[in-house]
Amino acid sequence: MKWKICLILILHVKFINSLGSDMAKQEFNDFVLKYNKTYSSPTEYDAAFENFAKEKLAIQAQRLKYESNQSTFLMGINYRSDQTFEQKKTWLGLLLEEMPTSQARALTNEFPSTSSNVPAPARIDFREFGYVTNVLDQGYFCSSCYSFATLCSVEGQFLKKNISTKVLSTQSIIDCSSNYKNKGCDGGYIESSFRYLIDSKGIEDFNSYPYEGTVGQCRYNNKKSVGSVRCYDKVQTDEETLKQILANTGPMAIGIKANFPSFYGYQNGVYDDDNCYGIPDHAVCLVGYGTDYSYNPPADYWLIKNSWSDEWGEKGFIRMKRGVNLCSLTSAMFYGEV
């Protein structure tokens, strides 16, 4: 263990010494060109470079853990690697309300049954069934993850039942659900989003009501609706039972704790940061599970769709360690019925 700590310290010193080097600056300038970055002043440029350099150091430290078999994921540069930890929090936006499952069922007027004697398959990936639409980007300044996660679940049901193959309008939830306690680009509730969809008796598609990443006037037109939501359920169970429920129902909107540097910087592999626990602050979509046998021992995982663009993670997805309730994954889970 001592040699690993020494190696990390040596790596740290070497990296600090290289911060002002031409190579480090060239890497940053390549990043600036790739993501079309602009900075208002030399001071802002220098601050962005410093953030980028710190991110590179964290990436190298995580790679050391990965290569010494202490972890099963890698971090990497993404389009927000020039920002501080605090700035990246706009990627979050899930709000939680205390609502017993029985109340959630009453609000929907129907409790959809998920009981089945069919055992859960060893793996499932709803992308292979065609139940998952393309990954989108909620943007820098709109904490609208709750809208993307909710509609991912609804899209899965629409695709599963051949109601619609279209990407649904996340913007309509941002603009139109303030009466349901949602706060537009300042965060919102999965439950409130479902209740809004039920009461509005429809949802437009993405092209009809496109995403803007800011709060605007509600312009929902029921005549342009591509389908409707009848009810939703709040799921409370353990991870093993969750496999069966997920396999029987389709994609779920869930809440996780994501406010960690390692999560923001995730690139690939099975995410297993032991520090990732706490009250959920980010909404994502659970779209499968499986086991990666390339690790020793094999790594069980949940497959999750994010809303941070396909430049983040594994083309917009993350595989998270399964069986330890990592990032408080089972704390807030919902699915809709159409």
Image: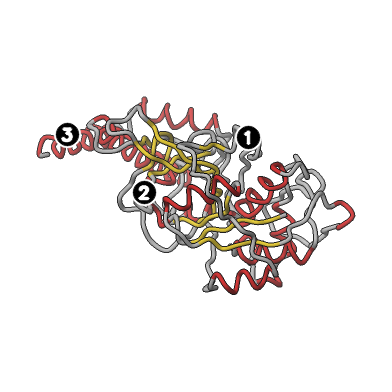
- Give the mark nearest the N terminus, 1 or 2: 1
Q: How many marks?
A: 3
Q: Residues within 10 Å of mark 2 (few under 14, many from 20)?
A: few
- 209 or 254, nearer to the observer: 254
What is the CA distance from the residue labelled 2 to the residue labelled 3?
32 Å
| The N terminus - image quarter | top left
- 191 or 183, nearer to the observer: 191
Q: Secondary structure at mark 1?
A: loop
Q: Quadrant of residue 132?
A: top right
Q: Residue at x 83, y 59 (%)?
A: 219
Q: Amino acid at mark 3?
A: Leu
Q: Quadrant of residue 131?
A: top right
Q: Amino acid at mark 2?
A: Gly
Q: Nearer the viewer, mark 2 or mark 3?
A: 2
Q: Secondary structure at mark 3?
A: helix
Q: Residue at x 52, y 73 (%)?
A: 98
Q: Which residue is the site of mark 3?
A: 7
Indicate the position of residue 318 as horizontal and vertical percent values.
47, 40
Q: Nearer the viewer, mark 1 or mark 3?
A: 1
Q: Amino acid at mark 1?
A: Phe
Q: Is residue 152 left or right of residue 56?
A: right
Farthest residue, direction right: 223
Q: Residue 95, relative to residue 156: is it above or below?
A: below
- 144 or 44, nearer to the observer: 144
Q: Which residue is the site of mark 1?
A: 129
Q: Which residue is the site of mark 2?
A: 323
Q: Residue 276, relative to residue 62: is it above or below?
A: below
